[in-house]
Each structure stands twice: as structure tokens, then as C-alpha cells.
Amino acid sequence: MDNAIARVKDFLEAHRTTAEQFLSEFLAIPSVSADPQHRPDMKRAAEWVAQFFSQMGLAAELIQSPTGHPVVYAETPHCEGMPTVLIYGHYDVQPAEDPTLWQTPPFEPTIRGGAIYARGASDDKGQVLTHLLSVGAWYQVTKSWPLNFKFVIEGEEEVGSSVLEKFLDEQADRLACDCIVISDGNQFGPDQPAITYGLRGIAYFELRVKGPHRDLHSGSFGGTVTNPATALTRMLGQFMTQDGRVAIPGFYDDVLPLSNEERRRLRELPFDEPAFWASLGVETAWGEPGYTVLERRWARPTFEVCGLWGGYQGDGAKTVIPANAGAKISFRLVPHQDPDRIREALLSYLAQICPPGVQYEVIDLHASPAVLTSLDSPYIKAAENAVKMAFSRSPVFTREGGSIPIVSRFQQRLGADVLLLGWGQDDDNTHAPNEKFSLADFHRGTLASAYLWEFIRQIGKATDS
Ligand code: BES
Ligand code: ZN
């Protein structure tokens, strides 16, 4: 058994092509959770994952609901005395949107320049697969499971995790575990892996503004009624100060400030700010005064307009006062901010700033608090060693600005340590055209995952004796 990990490594190397074929098959299924037209594809993707488990020798269960998308659940036979690891990921993907912006079609996975291009390549199918492949390889090589595993692969991460939340509320004891492993994020940079210890939370709303009961000729009626599009933009303009702080009273009340020690550690990360701006095609830095770019991205709350509509959008000019206007607005939250309190603060502020002559409605879209994980855990040490073995480089410790809504619920309900091991890169074009995932990272991620099981076994043994 002692050289098991060496044999697993050889096995993974010998089976790289098969691994890439599995990834291609998985990516070819357009599992867009937000689009009702893709409902059958969501089912196909869930079944593909279940089938993968059955090839691994595990029976998978689809946790269903009439409206949501299935969670695929599988577990290895319980072996007393071994740590239990819960692996979480998602098989749903973001909409591909304008196909003309893709160099190759979003659901025809294509390899170019060492990366596989397809919607979901990095977020999150490619990353999910690294863990399934590593556990499968361990089993093939040793004919036994290196640890107790529970797999939770959901189909609604991008749209609110309704089925999984219910599953977790109703059957938390089934998901009991010592450690939760998630790869649904990014490394710090090319060849610089990271262990992530924080995620921002989110409070996401649609704001609809309604004025006259029909569109009006802007010449005949302009100047006599409040224009909903103008009213909306005036309101949105009051959400932030000129220099980038959120202007809603009470918004910062609960924010957990960064400690000097953490600020010092973040400043030590090898972050190339000019390269960052260049990679985004922007000239000037902008953001909350008094904070570095990494602090703004990872540890400070924000307000963003994610979508905006109202009035005439076609060619040329059409003079009109639109009857309606709307916006999708999100707040990224940091530890200790409560999405419900943010919602209350938003509602009071809107009541205060809405001009007369229009009505508004706020629709809740997403709410999840931020996450901080403990770095003081034997699992973190195991992950650090595993990543080092596979990437030939020690990981740095980072936070992420994005959100994985179920994670804080996992922490609350299961009380297990969370390991966030993103194998992606910031330039993977997640949620954008031409999403990709580096095949080198796919294979290194799989190898790191295989080593992780070895190092967690060693913890298990250390505490047993
Ligand atoms: N994989 C991302 C989250 C992420 C992004 C982690 C960047 C680390 C770095 C995830 O799939 C995602 O996009 N989440 C959404 C959640 C939202 C729809 C509630 C997000 O962050 O916008
Ligand atoms: Zn995503």
C-alpha cells in the first residue's frame, strides 16, 4: 500500500487521453441551468455524472424537485475510522449567449494552445472532474477507497442551489463529514496555485421602475411626467459616492475590517498591478480609497449594476418616454455582513431617494453571506503539501471576490473544515465568451487531488494512533 500514491500518479499519467475525452463529453452537454429550454440537457448532464459514478463502481442518486435541477449524490461504502471528505461541485453552466463571439461553438469542446475551450470548462465541469478522476484512479489502482467520500454535484450553483439547500436542510446528517473539498475558483496566477480562505457573499436584486401606464411620445409629454429611465438612473447614481464607496446608510456597519496582519500578507503576494490593468484593457485604477486592488477585489464590499434597460434600444432614434425601466443590481458582501440587513438597508434607502411620479419594485434574486475558512486546520496543511507535490510550487493563500452560495450553509450545517482549491485562472473567461481551462491545470489539479487523499489519510492515521 505504501507506494499506492506513486502508482496512482503513474495511472493518471497513462490515462490522460481518456481523462480529456471524459471532459470533452461532459462539456458537450449544454447544461445551462438558467434557461428553461435546456431542461432536458440538465437532466442529461446529471445522468452523465451519475453514469460516471457507476463506472467508478458507485451507485449515484439523483435528488430531484419538480422545479429545480437534480443534485447528483454518491458515496463510498463507509469505513469506520477513516476521515470523511465531501466533494462539492456543479455541473450547471452559465448561458453561452452570443454565439458569434465564440471562436469555436460553446458546446463543441475544442483544444487550442494547450487549453480546452467550451462553456463550463473551468466553471466548473473541468474542476469537478479532477476530483472524480483522482478518486476513481485510487480505486482502480488499490481496489479500495482511500477515504470515505460523499459527492455532491449540483445543477443550480449559478441560479441559487434550491434543491441542494433543501437536501441540506432535510438530510444534513447524511452529509456529515470532516472536510469539504471544493474546486470552483482560480489559482493566483499562471503556475502559482493558491489555497483560498475567503469568498465574498452576494445580495442580488432586480429593481423595476414603473411610470405612466404606456410609453409616451417624449415631445408631447416630456417635461410633464417623471421618466422611469431617468428616475432609475438618478437612483442608481446615488448608490455610490464619486470615489467608490457604497452610499447606502448602514451598509458598512457590520463589515469585518481587514487585520493589519492580513493586509501585510496580501501586500506580499506577487501581484503585478499594471499587468492586471493591461489584461482587462482599462487604463486607470478605480475603487474604494484606502485599499489595494486585491483588498478591493477580495475583502471589501461593492455595488455593481449588472444589467440595465428601459426605452428604445434599436437602430436610430425613437423619441419616447418608456413606461418601464429596470436594472439588475448586486452587492458583493464581506464577512459579518448579513444579506437580510443589506436588503433592509436597500429598501429604506430606495424609499428615501425614489423621485415622485414613479413606483418601484424590488425582486430578490440571490442572497448568500461571505465565507472565511480557518487556515489553522490539518486539512489545510494536507492541501498545501498536495498542491506542492503536483504543481512543484507551494500555494499562496488568497481570498476570492466571487461567491459560492452553498458554502456558508455547509459551514453552518455541517461544521466541517472547507478547502477551496481553485484550479482555474483569472483569464479563463468564465461567464464570458471563449471560456477555457488549461489542460496542464486539469491534469495537475487531478494529481493534486490524488495527493490530497494520501495526505488526508496520513492525518487520519496520525489521529488514530
Ligand atoms: N465559480 C464561481 C465562483 C467564483 C468566481 C469563485 C471567481 C472564485 C472566483 C461560481 O460558479 C459563480 O459564478 N458564482 C456566482 C454566484 C451567484 C450566481 C450567486 C457568482 O459569484 O457570481
Ligand atoms: Zn460561475
Image (cartoon, rainbow, N blue to C red):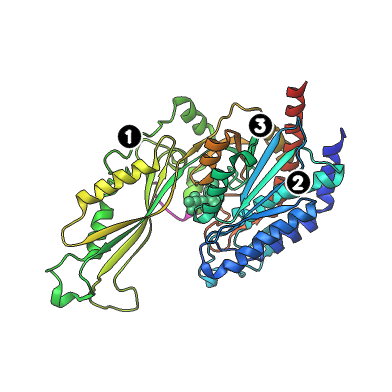
Extent of the magenta region: 280-285
Question: What residue appears at the point 20 percent right and 66 percent down from the top-left corner?
Answer: 227
Mark 3 touching mark 2, by CB under 8 A? no
Q: Earlier in the sequence, mark 1 or mark 3?
A: 1
Question: What residue appears at the point 73 percent right and 23 percent down from the top-left corner?
Answer: 463
Picture coordinates of residue 315, whole percent (x, y): 34, 78
Q: Earlier in the sequence, mark 3 or mark 2?
A: 2
* Majority SS type along the magenta span: loop
Q: Identity of the amino acid at label 1?
A: Asp
**Residue lying at the far left of the rendered structure:** 224
* Mark 1, residue position: 253
Picture coordinates of residue 269, whole percent (x, y): 54, 35
* Mark 3, residue position: 379
Q: Is residue 14 left or right of residue 81?
A: right
- Which disc number belongs to residue 82? none
Q: Is residue 387 above or below residue 325?
A: above
Q: Is any atom of residue 215 visible in this view? A: yes
Q: Write down the quadrant of residue 126 in the picture.
A: bottom right
How far, Cα to Cα, is label 1 from label 3? 33 Å
Picture coordinates of residue 17, whole percent (x, y): 79, 58
- Which disc number belongs to residue 134? 2
- Cβ of mark 3 under 8 A from ligand 1: no
Q: Earlier in the sequence, mark 2 or mark 1?
A: 2
Question: What residue appears at the point 26 percent right and 59 percent down from the top-left corner?
Answer: 360
